[in-house]
Amino acid sequence: MKILKKETEPLLYHNFPRPNTVSVDKDSNSIGLSILRSLIEHGMLLTSEDLYIPNNPRAPQSDQVENVYVQERACFTLSSRKDLFRPPATIGKGSHFEQFGSYSIGLNPLKARELGVIPVFYFYNSVNSENISYEILFRIREMRTILKVLAHIEAKSSLDNKLQISQQELREIGYGLDDQSNISKLIEKLTTESANSVLEYFSTNRVPAWNLIDWVDILLNFFQTADSKSKTNALYYYQQREWRIVKLFAEHIQCYPIFPATDSKYPEIEKNSLIEKLNDIGGLFSRLDQKPLSLLVGTRTKHFFDFVEEIITPKQSVKSTLKLLDEYGLIKDFKVDFKSGSHVFLKRCK
C-alpha cells in the first residue's frame, strides 16, 4: 500500500463515538465500527439537541413564550487532519479525538455543499442589552409566531391549494397556538369569508405558511452557542469551527424522519421501519429517549458515503475497517496512510 506524505487540505470531520455517550460496559471500538457500518449502509443520522431561547427581557409577556426548539443535525469541524490530534491551546481541553471520539470521517467542504452543509451561526450565552446575537434569535422567534398565526388563518380559509393542511395537522406537527391563547381564541371565531379576506393581503408568490415555518426551523438548526457555560472556557464551541448538516426535506435531498415515524407533511417512510434496519448502536435510541431523529441517505444521485474522502480509525481497528470496506466493495476506493496519529483511509482520485 502506498504511504502518503503530503498533508491534505482541511476537511469537514465528524468524529464518533463520543466518549461520554459510551457506557462502561460497551466497547468503543465495536461501537465505532458499528457506526461506520451504518454510515456506509444507511447514511448519516441527524440527532436531536435542544436550542433554548430565553424570554426577551424587553418584550411584553402577554402569553407564554415558546423557549425550546429541537434541532436535528449532524456536526462537523473544519480542520486539517493534523489539528484533529492536538488540543487547542487556548481552551485547555483535549484533542478533537479525545473529546468527540477516536473514529472520524472527512468530507470535502465544497462537494458536501450538495448535502446542505454550512457553517453554524454562533450566539453568546448571556442575555443583555448588548447581545445582538440574542436579539436576532428573538426576532426569528417573533417571525415564526406570525407565520404560525398565518398558517392557521390559511387553514380556516377556502384556499384551493393541494399543499394546504388543517388546523389539527398544524397542531400535530407542533405548529399550534398554545403559546398565543388570545390569538387562538380569535382564530377559532374566524369565518371562512374573513379568513379569505385577510389572505388577500398575503397573496404573494410563496409557499404555504407552514412550509415557511419549516424553513425558519431549518434556520434555527444552525444556531450554536459560542461559549461554554464555564467562565474559563469562553469561545470553547466557537473554536470547534463547527459546520452542520440539518434535517432538510427537499427534492434533491434524500432525508427521512425516523422519530416520529410518520409525518403528515411528507411521504411516509417505507413499511419496514428504519429503526428495524438500523442497529441500536451503543444504545443510541434509548439515549435519545424518543426525541426526533432523521436519516440523511444522500442526494438524488449520490449516497451519503460517496462524499466521504477520509476514514480515520484507531490502530487496533485497521484490520476490521479493511474487512468492512471489502464487505461493501469499497476497499478499492481507499488507500492507507500509515504515518498519521491513527490509520487514515484516503479515497483514491478517480
Image: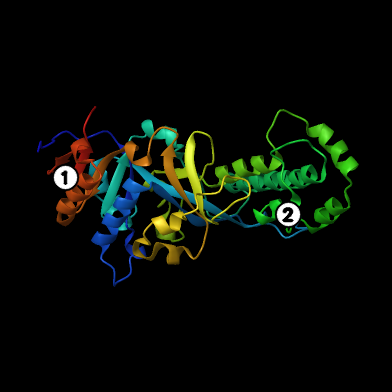
Residue 340: give its label: 1
State which quadrant residue 20 falls in.
bottom left
Residue 281 appears left or right of 9 = right
Q: Where is residue 258 shown, x and y percent of the image?
A: 50, 54
Looking at the rendered image, the disc whose residue lies closer to the viewer, 2 or 1, is 2
From where the camera sits, is residue 13 visible? yes
Residue visible at 48% across and 44% down in the picture: 255
Residue 168: give its label: 2
Residue situated furthest front in the rendering: 271
Residue visible at 83% across and 51% down in the picture: 187
Q: Secondary structure at mark 2?
A: helix
Query: Mark 1: which amino acid?
Result: Ser
Tell me which label, 2 or 1, sits earlier in the chain.
2
From where the camera sits, is residue 342 visible? no
Residue visible at 64% across and 53% down in the picture: 173
Query: Mark 2: which amino acid?
Result: Gln
Q: How is the image coloured?
A: rainbow
Residues at marks 2 and 1 touching, judged by CB atoms closer than 8 Å: no
Q: Where is residue 291 shown, x and y percent of the image?
A: 52, 60
Q: Quadrant of the C terminus?
A: top left
